[in-house]
Image: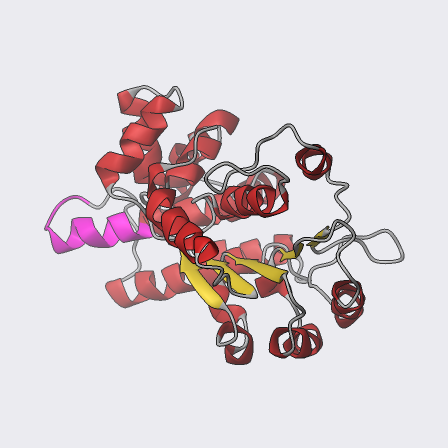
Amino acid sequence: MTAPTWHTTLWDRLQQRRQRQAMPHALLLAGPEGLGKRAFAQRLIRGLLCERPVDGEGCGECRACRLVAAGTHPDQIALGLGMRKDGTPRIDIVVDQIRELSSRLAMRSQFGGWQIACIDPADAMNVAAANALLKTLEEPAEQTLLLLVADQPWRLPQTIRSRCQRIEFHLPAHAEAADWLRRQGLSASDAEAGLQAAAGNPGRALRWHASGELAFRREVRDDLAGLAKGQARLVEVVRRWQDQHPAQRLWFASQAVVDELRARAAGEAAPLGSRLDDHGLLSWYERANRDREQVRGPLRLDLMLLELLSTWR
């Protein structure tokens, strides 16, 4: 897939640094999920490890490019959440993972070029892991690059953020995002509907369109309107939200509350018919967003949704 147009300026600036042999030792790719940060990171990795790069791009044919594509290049290290010893997925990146990474980066490059480690999601490092990474950031080896990818960079300690060169990914202009979606095969109407649902985020809109998840937007609004009128059963709504993409449903619920407040402010008929006052709606909006961030956390999802939706009226 062709790189998105909103990557162009960021990419060109980085390549200019490479040409001046002024590449930083640590980059923080920060911004909302859905803007292609991970594709940007992989593009950079391919270009740096390639044996015959062309204008900073990997050739795709040399041995190094083939190894990168297969995920087996010895100088490419990917560090993510991984699995616990008991086989369950981790919810954070722990200190032992960072120590192992630092040990690998302390060794020489096997191909005699760059060693590149990508930590994703970097904002999932716990405090001990972040502290362990500081030494590597403060005493980088030659031709070593740390790529930190974070959808929520504010969760990283300031000590980490201050030691990285930051590449900030912002939402593109609406027209640019809509044009990109049309070039991915969406109709003009689907592109507009997707961007409205995704708050202008083109990558998220594309993913939701492909998966059919945009249908949940209407369903969530119907559920909230039904609960407000006493026509929907709370337990059934909780079960449906729990079983099918709860984080996305909470996103759409938050959007619906914003539309409810806007309609009230404009003196129009409120689409959800909520009996909460404006302060109550704002409190519910904030709580729904907090719950969305905790969907994959240790709290029981059914009880969390039950508690939230029972306060909607």
Relative side of 9 to 108, left or right: left
Relative side of 113 to 273, left or right: right
Q: Residue lying furthest right in this view?
A: 86
Q: Is residue 263 magenta?
A: yes
Residue 117, position as x, y percentages in the image: 66, 57
Residue 241, position as x, y percentages in the image: 55, 43
Splitting the image into 4 quarters, where does residue 85 fall?
Answer: bottom right
Give above or below for 212 relative to 124.
above
Relative side of 241 to 71, left or right: left
**Residue under the point 53% across and 59% down:** 293
**Residue under the point 19% across and 52% down:** 262
Question: Which residues are drawn in magenta?
Answer: 257-269
Splitting the image into 4 quarters, where does residue 190 fall?
Answer: top left
Query: Can see residue 310?
Result: no
Nearest to the observer: residue 146 or residue 235: 146
**Residue under the point 32% across and 63% down:** 282
Nearest to the observer: residue 37 or residue 197: 37
Give above or below for 273 relative to 91.
above
User: In terms of secondary structure, what is the magenta stretch mainly?
Assistant: helix
* Quadrant the C terminus occupies: bottom left
> How has the structure been colored for display?
secondary structure
Residue 179, position as x, y percentages in the image: 28, 29
Relative side of 36 to 258, left or right: right
Q: Is residue 26 magenta?
A: no
**Residue under the point 56% across and 37% down:** 58
Give above or below for 161 relative to 230.
below
Splitting the image into 4 quarters, where does residue 183 fall?
Answer: top left
Query: Can see residue 194?
Result: yes
Residue 107, position as x, y percentages in the image: 80, 64
Nearest to the observer: residue 193 or residue 207: 207
Query: Looking at the image, how many numbered discs can be counted on the residues?
Result: 0
